[in-house]
């Protein structure tokens, strides 16, 4: 798990929405990218500019499939008839 600190309310709101919808979120802070499932978003009111602590469980991005296509046999319904 990674804990990321942000002062952007927009990023915090985006992370909260991703947490409640159950989808992965992507944060970009200081040139670093964080990608994963959001576990918690906590507001820290003890500091003068508000900040949020976002806990992310990292997930591995799947590379896009290149050169892959459906087989014509798998799409042909008539080829699976019982004889």
Image (cartoon, rainbow, N blue to C red):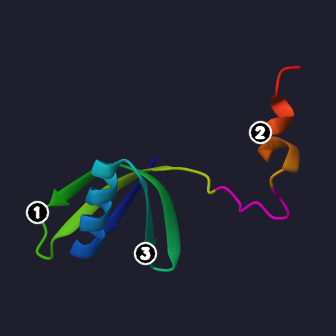
Q: Is residue 8 visible?
A: no
Tell me, yes or no, whether the highlighted magenta stretch contains residue 63. yes
Q: Quadrant of residue 43?
A: bottom left
**How would you rate the neighbour count of disc 2 (Cα within 10 Å): few for under 14, some for 14-19, many for 20 or more?**
few
The tag earlier along the polypeptide, 3 or 2, is 3
User: Observer-nearest residue: 1 or 62?
Assistant: 62
- Looking at the rendered structure, the secondary structure element under dot 3 is strand
Pointer 3: what residue? 29
Residue farthest along the top direction in this orientation: 83
* Residue 15 placement (x, y as % from top left): 32, 61
Position of residue 27 in the picture relative to residue 66 (left or right): left
- Looking at the rendered structure, the secondary structure element under dot 1 is loop
The tag earlier along the polypeptide, 1 or 2, is 1
Task: Report the magenta residues as a range.
Answer: 62-69
Position of residue 49 in the picture relative to residue 64 (left or right): left
The tag earlier along the polypeptide, 3 or 1, is 3
Pointer 2: what residue? 77
Residue 46, labelled with which disc? 1
**How would you rate the neighbour count of disc 3 (Cα within 10 Å): few for under 14, some for 14-19, many for 20 or more?**
few
Tell me, yes or no, whether the highlighted magenta stretch contains residue 79. no
Question: Which residue lies at the image location 81% right of the left edge and 57% below the top edge?
Answer: 69
């Amino acid at each position: 798990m990674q804990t990321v600190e942000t002062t952007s309310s927009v990023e915090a709101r985006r992370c909260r929405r991703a947490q409640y919808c159950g989808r992965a979120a992507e944060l970009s802070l200081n040139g670093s990218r964080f990608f994963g499932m959001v576990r918690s978003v906590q507001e820290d009111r003890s500091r003068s500019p508000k900040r949020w602590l976002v806990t992310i469980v990292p997930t591995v991005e799947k590379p896009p499939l290149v050169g892959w296509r459906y087989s014509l046999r798998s799409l042909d319904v008539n080829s699976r008839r019982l004889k």
